[in-house]
Image (cartoon, grey):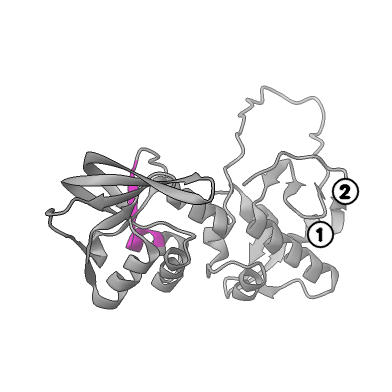
Amino acid sequence: MWRHRERLYYTFPELMDFYSISRAVLDNRVLNGALTAHTWIQPCCAEAIVEMPSGNQILLTKTDKIWEGYGAIYPNDYRKILQRGCAHLREFKGQDSEMLRLKNGAPDIMVHLEDIVILARDRDKLEEYFGFSPDVAEATVEVLGRIAPVKRTAARADPSFRHVTFEDEEYLFGTVQAAVVKQLYDSAKAGDPWVNGKKILGNAGSEGNSLRNIFARKKNWRKLIESDSRGYYRLNEKFVASVSLSANDHHPSIG
């Protein structure tokens, strides 16, 4: 679990291990521009170049600066690094549409494959892609005594299964998570409740290979989804038998 939010970056091996994904998945995300790779740049002389539209023309503004920090790598340059293991770079992506280019006379920056990291803010985008969503804040109630049996909240879900309630647990799911639950529900109603985990993830549009990682940040998710320990999953039979689907079930949006 990523508990240390103060971290600035994560290495590729860390992400691969935590999400149970291959290097190729991360590489493809970087190459298609969906994920940004960074490397640390030592102090150097550079110019910040920004394109400014002016009528039918594009004007370039240049500002000299001493630059130090994490530089974003262009996808084409990342491809060179993948092919050769390293590459001499002179241009990096700055903030917004800014490009950072080394000044004439400044030496190239050698970037090796092992130098590349994913910043924390970009890792959050990766989690969104895999279907993670922020945990719902929880409240703790101290039970001092009972004078009557506790009545559990009825099982219910919206048609998309992004908002599910079962045995007093409320789940707010991301897109991939909700697609997984809906598949399991549809299979259960069709009389074939046990479904292969990798097949579920593929149908949900996830490139991950483990439901455990997809739902890792959802407390008590195993109360809702059961495993046979051989790669097959099903919804809790009590949930399937008692759930009420409501098109009017209101819930906050989650990204």
Q: What kind of residue is marked 2?
A: Ala
Q: Which mark is residue 5?
A: none
Which quadrant would residue 45 be assigned to in this image? top left
Q: Is residue 13 magenta?
A: yes
Q: Amino acid at mark 1?
A: Val
The residue that appears at 24% across and 73% down in the rendered structure is: 85
132 sits left or right of 41 in the view:
right
Q: Secondary structure at mark 1?
A: helix
Q: Residue furthest top?
A: 144
Cα distance between the residues tagged 2 and 1: 17 Å
Residue underneath mark 1: 240
Crowding around mark 1 (Cα neighbors within 10 Å: few <14, some 14 to 19, many 20+) is: some
Vertical arrangement, residue 13 with respect to residue 101, above or below:
below
Residue at coordinates 67% horizontally, 72% vertically from top-left?
A: 203
The first of marks 2 and 1 along the sequence is 1
Is 146 rendered above or below residue 157?
A: above
Residue closer to the observer: 28 or 147: 28
Per the rendering, the mark at residue 247 is 2
| Nearer to me, 156 or 242 | 156
Is residue 93 shown left or right of residue 203?
left
* Magenta residue span: 7-15
